């Protein structure tokens, strides 16, 4: 049951036909979102079952419990406000319409937040990351697009107050970017950036186009989590050290020098 919910959540997080691979916010009229949360829908049924074991859920996912509770309160508020649309007072009806619009937006945001909370976290979510951008199809326009994307990530890191260090930077002739890499570190940096990996495309009239034609250009983004530091302890008793000496006529130096050394880790047989 939960795996099918995650698949539905993934379809919502990566909509088709996007200009770039970045995620887009769901609108209030998103049909897949409404189907998931409709009465008897898969996600609504899942949340109702979880509500039966609320004490257990509070221990494992306290944030999810809080958002689900707030969603139920907002939906109840929406139903009560809708009754005011039939009131004889015109001013009261207009006020109710404004309240309904605002309430629907908040409900959509809460539903989207629930979907994100249902996606399981990874061990590397807290890690720093390496960002790599490379120009793809589109010539100079693709390089200009790559430069804009790299600048966007740098500004986003500054907005999140992350550490951003440029490691490689290979510009093009007209101010674009062929390839660049950067080290980004901060709170949950990989969690927020891991979905950016992939091919991004843009359709627009390039600066290099003189006849006003629309071109399609691409660039690729790679997001690599940086491994955390580990303490590696090797017991000397687990190592076998073999030394080799040259033989044959060559004097005393040949027979006394260890010219080859092989170290074997006995538990794993690594050499």
Image (cartoon, grey):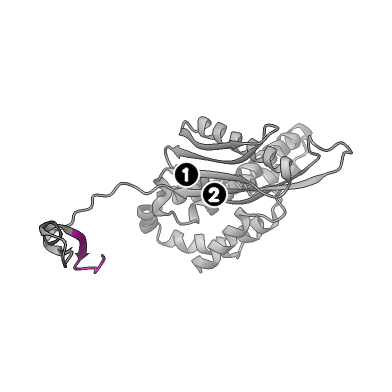
> Is residue 270 depicted above or below 20 in this figure?
below
Provide the secondary structure element on which disc 1 rests. Answer: strand
Q: Give the crowd class for mark 2: few <14, some 14-19, many >=20 residues within 10 Å.
A: some
> Is residue 62 depicted above or below 144 in this figure?
below
Q: In the figure, is residue 260 to the left or right of 210? A: left
- Answer whether residue 169 is visible to the viewer in this image: yes
Read off the residue under disc 1. 130
Which residue corresponds to the image point at 69% horizontal and 46% vertical from the top-left?
A: 83
In the figure, residue 33 lies in which quadrant? bottom right
How far is the residue under mark 2 from the one under mark 1?
8 Å
Read off the residue under disc 2. 222
Question: Residue extending furthest right?
Answer: 211
In the figure, residue 100 lies in which quadrant? top right
Q: In the figure, is residue 136 to the left or right of 224? A: right
The location of residue 213, given as percent across then percent down, is 86, 43
- Disc marking residue 71: none
The location of residue 165, given as percent across then percent down, is 47, 33
């Amino acid at each position: 049951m939960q795996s099918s919910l995650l698949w539905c959540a993934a379809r919502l997080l990566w909509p088709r036909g996007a200009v770039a691979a970045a995620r887009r916010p769901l609108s209030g009229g998103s049909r897949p979102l409404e189907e998931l949360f409709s009465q008897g829908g898969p996600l609504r049924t899942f949340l109702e079952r979880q509500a039966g074991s609320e004490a257990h859920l509070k221990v494992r996912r306290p944030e999810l419990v809080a958002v689900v509770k707030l969603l139920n309160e907002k939906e109840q508020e929406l139903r009560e406000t809708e009754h005011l649309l039939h009131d004889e007072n015109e001013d009261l009806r207009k006020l109710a319409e404004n309240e309904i619009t605002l309430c629907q937006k908040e409900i959509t945001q809460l539903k989207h937040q629930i979907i994100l909370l249902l996606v399981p976290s990874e061990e590397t979510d807290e890690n720093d990351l390496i960002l790599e951008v490379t120009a793809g199809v589109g010539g100079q326009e693709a390089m200009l697009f790559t430069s804009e994307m790299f600048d966007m990530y740098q500004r986003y890191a500054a907005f999140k107050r992350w550490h951003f260090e440029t490691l490689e930077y290979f510009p093009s002739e007209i101010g674009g970017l062929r390839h660049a890499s950067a080290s980004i570190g901060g709170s949950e940096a990989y969690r927020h950036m891991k979905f950016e990996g992939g091919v991004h495309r843009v359709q627009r009239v390039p600066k290099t186009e003189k006849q006003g034609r629309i071109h399609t250009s691409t660039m690729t983004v790679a997001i690599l989590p940086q491994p955390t530091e580990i303490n590696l302890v090797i017991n000397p008793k687990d190592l076998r050290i073999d030394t080799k000496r040259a033989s044959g006529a060559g004097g005393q130096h040949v027979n006394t020098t260890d010219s080859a050394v092989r170290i074997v880790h006995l538990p794993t047989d690594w050499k």
